[in-house]
Image (cartoon, grey):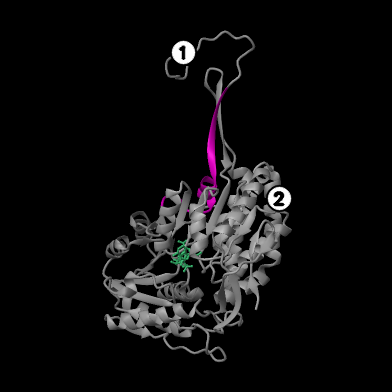
Amino acid sequence: MNTIPHWINGTEVTGQDTAPVFNPATGAEQAQVVLGGAADVDIAVTAASAAFETWSESSLTQRTQVMFAFRQLLVEHEEELARIISAEHGKTVDDARGEIVRGREVVEFACGLGDVLKGSFSDQVSRGIDVHNFRQPLGVVAGITPFNFPAMVPLWMHPIAIATGNTFILKPSERDPSAANFVADLYQRAGLPDGVFNVVHGGKNAVDAILTHPGIEAVSFVGSTPIAKYVHEQATSHGKRVQALGGAKNHAVVLPDADLEFAANHITAGAYGSAGERCMAVSIAVAVGDAADALVAVLERKAREVKVGPGNAPDTEMGPLVTKAAQERIENAVTTAHTQGATIVVDGRGLKVDGHEDGFFTGPSLLDHVTTEMDAYKEELFGPVLAIIRVNTLDEAIDLINANPYGNGTALFTASGEAARRFQRNIKVGMIGINVPVPVPMSYYSFGGWKDSLIGDSPIHGPEGIRFYTRPKVITTRWPQPKQQTTAGFNFPTSS
Ligand code: NAD
């Protein structure tokens, strides 16, 4: 059986401990991935530290040229990478292609680094004195990423970290590890020097080694909120910069003036696309006023139409869940919701896909009359379950969302500009869609939620990514004329 190795200093590195990697569509174990620990992380840090000495001295042009070449390779190998992702994650090949394209946009942002990294210059701030600033890379930085976007989420991090002159260690999810090695190979072919991009596979041991290693300057994390809190606490207490993005519970509000067919179409895709395993998935539909009954009727029809199957079949719209444990957790959550009083409008439990009876499939589930006390509302289910909550007014919907501990994404479906403006100004959520169900910002903006969806204060990629992976210097300069007579004052200097 294929063993997926680490990638350190431009070569594959094996290890003793391994974990199984499954094909979620068949339920079969298809590979083993090595599980690294402190020794592997230390080897990677040594390689990345040595590479930093030269990479951080390379020119801006040289670094962006690597990014242009890397982008081109991502285009040429999109199909291959999408199939690798689909085979380990379970999502459809088209959906995997989508995550590659969205991740590639961050590479494109990094290709324009020359513009965004420009410092500023102030002439004659005092007589004969000028001030300018610029930013420098941190050193060795690390990224710890979740299973649900094995290409895109790491791409939120490493192109910006590397283009700004850092060297990078990626610890991808152990559930779908192959995309990281594929990307490492593309970087090498793009001309990136060995040791600049490294992959250490593993679980908690590898993560703990990263969080405590004195040679790592910064940690980017994306995953569930409890682990984001842990990572933030551990890494900051070891003196590192941390950006830590957590889980979500995203509400889509539908006002009575919305085009219900349009709203239901987009909410269905946002809820069940990628089997609900997206941090920006719509998990709650908030039906306002007399929109509710009609909305539920359309959502029911659309949920029943979703084509569930293996991710590599051309007509599949929704693939399996990532693991057997996830499949069981979701089906139990639907049972619990029913026990707690929710109405099951569409029941996805027990779905069998012909020829894939052992796959980790569950069908789309639609729950009505859900309340804020129910587990289906309180917990991040991270599966194809859409819960409907009924409220009377937009302000009630806003209060409901603001009381939720998460604040990643939200959407409003309406024909009213006034309602949309009130919503976007008053909602305590980081990313908002107006008639857009999954409002993932473009790479030249930054991505990040509020409250428990982002621990600390640093969103990811875009301008915040540049800030995160660099530190500023401000230089105050005077070039006196030869033999110019001046007096040095003993008071604190002020401008004159
Ligand atoms: P996860 O938190 O279980 O794992 C994320 C990473 O942390 C993985 O690399 C994993 O190996 C590591 N990890 C897991 N348990 C650990 C532990 N006890 N100690 C140290 N490290 C540990 O998340 P997941 O299940 O892979 O991904 C799904 C979660 O990620 C969801 O909560 C989803 O909302 C979130 N997510 C958030 C965003 C965002 O932008 N906010 C994006 C994608 C996913």
From the viewer's perspective, is residue 481 above or below residue 343? above
Query: Image point 46% across, 46% down: which residue?
Result: 239
Taking the image as shown, residue 93 lies to the left or right of residue 373, namely: right
Write down the region rendered in magenta: 456-477
Q: Nearer the viewer, residue 176 or 373?
A: 176
SS type, badge 1:
loop
Query: Image point 46% across, 83% down: which residue?
Result: 362
Which quadrant holds the N terminus? bottom right
Give the residue at mark 1.
Answer: 489
What kind of residue is marked 1? Gly
| Magenta segment includes 82 | no
Residue 2 image offset from top left, x and y in percent: 65, 75
User: In the rendered structure, which disc, 2 or 1, sits on the residue that comes first in sequence?
Assistant: 2
* Numbered tag placed on residue 65 in the rendering: 2
SS type, badge 2:
helix
Residue extending furthest toward the bottom: 354
Q: Nearer the viewer, residue 42 or 393?
A: 42
From the viewer's perspective, is residue 193 above or below residue 353? above
Q: Nearer the viewer, mark 2 or mark 1?
A: 1
| Magenta segment includes 458 | yes
Q: Nearer the viewer, residue 179 or 236?
A: 236
> Callout 1: few (<14), some (14-19), or many (20+) C-alpha neighbours within 10 Å?
few
Taking the image as shown, residue 139 lies to the left or right of residue 399, namely: right
Residue 144 image offset from top left, x and y in percent: 52, 60
